[in-house]
Image (cartoon, helix red, strand yellow):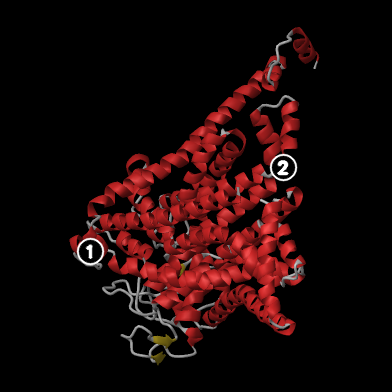
Amino acid sequence: MHSLGAQAQSNTRRRSPGEIVAAAVPASQLRRRVVDRTFLALCIVFTGLAVVILGILLVTIWQDGHTRLSWQFLNSFASRRTEEAGVRAPMWGSIWACVICALAAVPIGVGTAIYLEEFSKRSRFRSFIQLNIANLAGVPSIVYGILGLTAFARAFGSASTDSPITIGQPESFFYLQLPFGHGVLAGGLTLMLVVLPIIIVSSQEALRSVPRSLRTASLALGGTQWQTTWNITLPASIPMIMTGAILAMSRAIGEAAPILVLGVPLFIRTTPINLMSDFTVLPLQIYNWAMRQQSGFHELAAAAIIVLLAVLLTLNAVAVIIRHRLQRAAS
Amino acid sequence: MSNAAEISAAAVRAAAANRRGIARSRAARIGTERIIRGTLLACALMSIVTTFTILVILLAQSVSFFAMPQVSIWEFFTGTTWAPLLGEEKHFGIWPLIAGTLLVTSIAAAFALPVGLIVAVYLSEYAPSRVRSILKPILEVLAGIPTVVYGFFALAVITPFLHDHISESFGTFNALGAGLAVGIMILPIVASLSEDALRAVPRSLRDAAFAMGGTRFDVSAKVVVPAALSGIVASWLLAITRAIGETMIVALAAGGLARMTLNPADEVQTMTAYMVQIFTGDAPAYGIEYKSSFAVATVLFVITLALTMAGNLFLRAFREEYE
């Protein structure tokens, strides 16, 4: 304390707090500063490690897979002859499953968020639902697969899977059956279960970010709760909701475990034509190829990963652009 | 955001919209409102139904599994032999699967929890904003990579590296390779959740510590990290939950041999990997192996649920303190 005052008096030049502290400190401080610098070095090494791991991951996969990338790879079905194999079936399967998942999960998720944020009072019931959603977010995706298998694919065993109730013919575009079996509808709905908690939480954050004053203005003019939500709150939060939904979809596209539990066929040479069609998804195809020891399949898996990562990167870029527009519009 | 111009614009929009509504009778408006509220409530109830259905399915199938003559509850919870598929005499003692899961999870946690926390401290306390703006997207990319890709990475890069440079005893499938891949997967979760917790600590605490002459390390380690501890513990618990429930990495890289071992070079089977084996195999539906996977799923569900709830409790404690 004494030396600090002396230093400050003897020197009229303005110094930064750091300098004052550095000049004033006793010898024991030296050790602490060495610890500080060492820790910073450790921080940089560990953070660098994360960056290096990502680099190695991307470079290895590119090296292993890029020779297999071609138009033909995207446009052919899986095959035992590795040089002819491609990702046509899993790619279309992923697109179908993702679209079904989005059509189901976004309305239900946003609806739940609106109910919790705009319509429900702070009650015990509300915090129960909130706690339940937080817990659902921690359920392993393979458990959702079991739920999808039992509820959607088998309809709780209420009707036999061998002789389902049907509408239309298997080759028509509107063909439906109950239970759904391991068709693309069951897959999309199972993925919906996985991403629903994510969409609900991100939509709630979006709605919460809309200023109270906007709602109050609308309510003061005689708008009902729903008119306020539909005309004021939702339009103001839709970019953020969309960003959350797109990130949730990129999670859905990467999920393999729940689809695997549904028991989809491993070897598919068709693309879906209706909601009951057999399908597979890109991550599952990657899993199947990666499991094979024979030469050639390893490269196929790497090439399929490149396709999957390209799709995810595109989705993320779209989310970033929307977020960017939102920030510009808000400023 | 909440400037006067925007509010008045919103008011004009609201007025126009409300006028459209008022044109109809008040009774009709209230009716519509009720229907909409009911629909939204139904959406919210979906999540309760989901939880309830999961519980019913798991419990019902587990009960019918334990009712089978070859199975005893006592053996299931205490037995150390898991041999559901091979041989005349089947054994259902879940401990080898739990041991496999714990081994892989411990390796992942030993790597990801400290590294994730250090990355979080660096991002929140040390890194200049330019470095931060580069690192955050990199962590987001890491967090967005599908787990099957990490599984491929474990098979194609980590395990060959371990075999060539550490020990010949690492086979194609081993716990360490899978554990490290799971660790890489949960690293961004730990880092970003812990960073959120660290940044929520009020500036005034840091300023006070700096004013006492503390170095940045003193401030971080003795003030900020203790103040954010419940948030950090929450991030650890949630990350461990993800590691325990992780499926594709262990199915690809850890192998399919259920046994009690602590050797990271050994092939192990986790609870999730066993479920994959059953659901991709030819085990007949409604047979004993098939039903055993539901019992395993129940144990997995209970463990992850307990950890998630504990994590959320810590998170809430932290939020009540600082938000």
Label 1: element kind? loop
Q: Residue at x 61, y 27 (%)?
A: A36
Query: What is the x, y in percent for residue A241?
Result: 56, 61
Quarter of the image for residue B19 reads: bottom right
Task: Please tell me how many numbered marks the rendered image carries.
Answer: 2
The amino acid sitting under disc 2 is Ala
Mark 2 highlights which residue?
B227
- Hey, which residue is sitting farthest top in the picture? A10
The CA distance from mark 2 to mark 1 is 55 Å
Specify whether A264 is left or right of B320: left
Q: Residue at x 38, y 58 (%)?
A: A311
In this view, the residue in front, B276 or B135, is: B135
Mark 1 highlights which residue?
A85
Specify whether A189 is left or right of A39: left
Q: Is residue B274 above or below residue A311?
A: below
Quarter of the image for residue B24 reads: bottom right
Asked if residue B62 shows in the view, the reply is yes
The residue mark sitting in front, 2 or 1, is 1
Quarter of the image for residue A117 reads: bottom right
Number of other residues with Cα within 10 Å of mark 2, as a class: few under 14, some 14 to 19, many 20 or more: many
Query: What is the x, y in percent for residue B57?
Result: 55, 79
The answer as to whether the residues below labels 2 and 1 share one chain is no
Query: What is the x, y in percent for residue A250?
Result: 45, 60
